[in-house]
Image (tube, grey):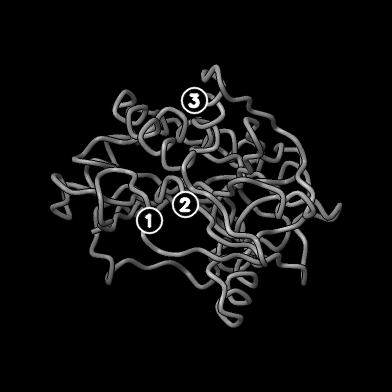
Amino acid sequence: MIHLNGELVEEKSAKLSILNRGFQYGDALFESIRVINNQIMFWETHYFRLMSSMRILRMEIPDFFSPEKLAELIHDVVEANNYLSQAVKVKINVYRDGKGLYLPDSKHVGYIISASPISSPFFIKSNSYCEVELFKDHYLNSGLLSTLKTNNKLTQILASIFAKENGYDNCLMLNENKSVVEATNGNLFLLKNNKLKTPPLSDGCLNGIIRKQLVEIVGELDEYEIEEASISPFELQKADELFYTNAIQGIVSINKYRKKEFNTEFSTQLIGKLNARARLSD
């Protein structure tokens, strides 16, 4: 079951017009959220990112898009699918409704809320080996639009295909200034000695939910320093650790980039701190 514009409907029965602007022009955005035992993880941060993204895209925010009402709709979907005691990924898709060409004839929006089960209620250390490579065929643009979770993700799609075709587990993305911005599906962090770096939003990285949590977590640690600064490709092989983050997987350690093998100690420690912070957000 999914929520489609206010109605709970069977996924196979849900219908969108082929003229839908999300399909025709990518005039849409999405939010991916962990829900554990019907508790929405980091809901306030997700909600304000969604509202901010809609404002930036000049979408008209419906009056009922309050945090309480959207949370209620999420809970409805979780319950309708019998996921109340499970770990699930909830996805909110928001698209600009109406017709028009590049100029829409309306700022009104439609929305879809769906849910699918995930394997663990906690963020856990992945047992999968992760080798990455730089993706240099196309670049992300630095600036505000790249920080949003819009439907325009062709560069990440092509990078994912490149990784699959060449035997890598993920790719690291570059912007037009040749700075390393992020992984295909998450924010990048680089540890060297006691300094943890992550690219600034101005470089075009996603304004990630877990990125925000880790910046705050590491900022409270006396023995480590957090810095939001551009990362050069030359820094990658000099790093002690590399990892990336997203709202569903949490923290994913990178084991190898070219000839360099990385430690995973610090990223593993951070998983425990992130789980503790997630519990406090309930």
Marks 3 and 2 in Cβ contact (< 8 Å): no
Tell me the residue at 66%/61% (across/down): 100
Judged from the image, the secondary structure of the residue bearing numbered disc 1 is: loop
Q: Residue furthest bottom?
A: 165
Q: Quadrant of residue 189?
A: top right
Q: Earlier in the sequence, mark 3 or mark 2?
A: 3
Between residues 192 and 46, which one lies in front from this camera angle? 192
Q: Point out which mark residue 252 bears.
A: 2
**Residue 43: percent from the left, percent from the top?**
38, 32
**Nearer to me, 233 or 43:** 233
State the SS at label 2: strand
Which residue position holds label 3?
217
Q: Quadrant of residue 114?
A: bottom left
Q: Which quadrant of the rendered structure holds the C terminus?
A: top left
Quarter holding residue 225: top right
Name which residue type carries label 3.
Answer: Ile
Earlier sequence position, callout 3 versus callout 1: 1
Q: CA distance from mark 1 to mark 2?
A: 7 Å
Q: Residue at x 51, y 73 (%)?
A: 18
Q: Is residue 196 above or below residue 170?
A: above
Expressed as whole percent of the image width and height from the top left, the position of residue 164 reads 55, 78
